[in-house]
Image (cartoon, rainbow, N blue to C red):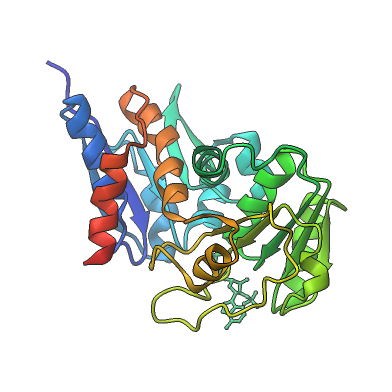
């Protein structure tokens, strides 16, 4: 008899994470005996926790706010994507070494591929609002798909400068709040700021400058239809909500820990949607 595999989500706070629901759904679907648990770990305890992960009986896990950069510094080996971002959200063991990957890039790309197929065909210009950790993963994804110019608009200009240093001249600084000129000719608009999230101010910007074929997506998924997405839909633009990014970023971790590649199904989406609605 083999011991059931255990993985966890490491964060602080971690109570509201929906990752246990997602991985629990897949474990049940495959009929696997493993588990996926919550671990609330304070920043001062993170390094020791990760070093002792195997001793605690875990085969790996996810790392979330505020630990993604610290985890990057603690793992033994990193994937190219984690290196490009300076942040790790998924860890696992290989030959006794702790590996770190960043699956937010995959999550972002797979969500758009799924909900707005063809979004990257001939993508010339993209606009990203915000310049935090989520923005870095999204810029990396858009760059990977060949966009020629990625305009970043952020309240704090220094954070945009940091993205330009990280990703090079494909990233250009745009004014905050973004103007109609910034949107002209853009095939993709992504919000990565926390504006529009439940309990935060809305993101009330004029989308008139966007071309009719533009795709608009939001990293915020509570609520599912943000003010930005509602405005974009009212203009007849294609919109993609942020829930799929959360669901798709979980796929590579599950496969590494439990050895089966899960699929993001309408049933899983409905389960998490219902939880968001509660
Ligand atoms: P994450 O890692 O999830 O991207 P973050 O690093 O806290 O989170 O980034 C939040 C983003 O929302 C930032 O771009 C932030 O802008 P600043 O860099 O100026 O802080 C943006 N943001 C948050 N509140 C905002 C507000 N009231 N107006 C404009 N931008 C805001």
Q: In which quarter of the image is residue 135?
A: bottom right
Nearest to the observer: residue 7 or residue 147: 147
Q: Residue furthest bottom?
A: 201
| Residue 274 percent coordinates (x, y) | 23, 57
Tell me if 145 is positioned left or right of 20 in this view: right
Q: Quadrant of residue 263?
A: top left
Nearest to the observer: residue 203 or residue 108: 203
**From the viewer's perspective, is residue 28 above or below residue 125?**
above
Tell me if 276 is positioned left or right of 227 in this view: left
**From the viewer's perspective, is residue 214 above or below residue 105?**
below
Q: In which quarter of the image is the N terminus?
A: top left
- Whereabouts is ligand 1, in terms of quadrant? bottom right
Residue drawn at (58%, 80%) of the image: 204
**From the viewer's perspective, is residue 97 above or below residue 160?**
above
Residue drawn at (68%, 54%) of the image: 214
Q: Quadrant of residue 95?
A: top left
């Amino acid at each position: 008899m083999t011991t059931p595999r255990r993985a966890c989500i490491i964060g602080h706070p971690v109570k509201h994470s929906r990752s246990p629901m997602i991985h629990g759904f897949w474990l049940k679907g495959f009929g696997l005996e493993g588990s996926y648990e919550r671990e609330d770990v304070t920043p001062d305890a993170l390094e020791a926790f990760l070093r002792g992960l195997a001793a605690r009986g875990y085969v790996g896990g996810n790392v979330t706010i505020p630990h993604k950069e610290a985890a990057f510094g603690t793992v033994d080996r990193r994937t190219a994507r984690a290196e490009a971002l300076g942040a790790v959200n998924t860890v696992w063991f290989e030959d006794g070494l702790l590996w770190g990957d960043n699956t937010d890039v995959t999550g972002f790309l797979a969500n758009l591929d799924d909900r707005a197929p063809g979004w990257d065909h001939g993508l010339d210009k993209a606009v990203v609002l915000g310049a935090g950790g989520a923005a870095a993963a999204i810029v990396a994804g858009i760059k990977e798909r060949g966009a020629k110019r990625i305009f970043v608009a952020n309240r704090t200009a220094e954070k945009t400068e940091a993205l330009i240093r990280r990703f090079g001249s494909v990233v250009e600084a745009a004014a905050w709040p973004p103007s109609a000129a910034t949107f002209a000719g853009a095939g993709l608009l992504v919000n990565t700021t926390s504006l529009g999230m439940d309990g935060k101010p809305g993101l009330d910007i004029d989308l008139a400058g966007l071309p009719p074929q533009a795709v608009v997506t939001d990293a915020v998924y509570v609520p599912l239809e943000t003010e930005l997405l509602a405005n974009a839909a009212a203009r007849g633009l294609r919109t993609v909500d942020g829930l799929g990014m959360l669901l798709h970023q979980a796929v590579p971790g599950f496969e590494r820990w439990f050895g089966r590649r899960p699929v993001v199904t309408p049933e899983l989406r409905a389960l998490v949607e219902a939880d968001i609605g509660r």
